[in-house]
Amino acid sequence: MGRLKSNGRLVRRSPLSTFLELELLSVAAEGKAAGWQTLRRLTATEKRLDPQLLDDLLERARRQQDVVEEWRARQAEAAFRSG
């Protein structure tokens, strides 16, 4: 159904489709990192939270952000070059 949009491409994906999907992943990874960071700050007063686990989760989210940003930058170049 998504391919029936008026971008002139009914059979294959628009070059911007992957770029927009990566933009969404970038925002999601940023939000996840912000959530872990918020919980990490609460470890000083909330003893049920494990600071090391939250540090690990935050580091993983930051690595994911880096990977998605690398892919997004490459896709942006490809999408706007072909457009």
Image (cartoon, helix red, strand yellow):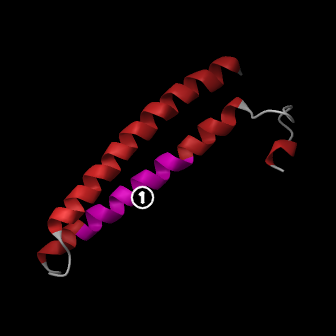
Q: Secondary structure at mark 1?
A: helix
In the rendered structure, does residue 53 fall within the stretch colored magenta? no
Residue 8, x across and y down, in percent: 86, 31
Q: Quadrant of residue 39?
A: bottom left
Left or right: where does residue 20 sit relative to residue 55?
A: right
Left or right: where does residue 49 sit relative to residue 75?
A: left
Furthest toward the top, the residue is: 81
The residue drawn where x is 23% and y is 56% is 56
**What are the residue bounds of the magenta stretch?**
24-39
Front one among 25 and 60: 60
Q: Quadrant of residue 79?
A: top right
Front one among 27 and 4: 4
In the rendered structure, does residue 38 fall within the stretch colored magenta? yes
The residue drawn where x is 20% and y is 58% is 55
Main SS category, magenta section: helix
> Which quadrant: the C terminus?
top right
The residue drawn where x is 67% and y is 34% is 16
Residue 82, x across and y down, in percent: 69, 19
Q: Residues within 10 Å of mark 1 (few under 14, many from 20)?
A: few
Q: Is residue 59 above or below residue 3?
A: below
The residue drawn where x is 40% and y is 52% is 30
Residue 42, x across and y down, in percent: 20, 74
Residue 63, x across and y down, in percent: 32, 44
Left or right: where does residue 1 sit relative to residue 37?
A: right
Q: Quadrant of residue 46?
A: bottom left
Q: Is residue 43 above or below residue 33?
A: below
Left or right: where does residue 74 sit relative to residue 4?
A: left
* Residue underneath mark 1: 31
- The amino acid sitting under disc 1 is Gly
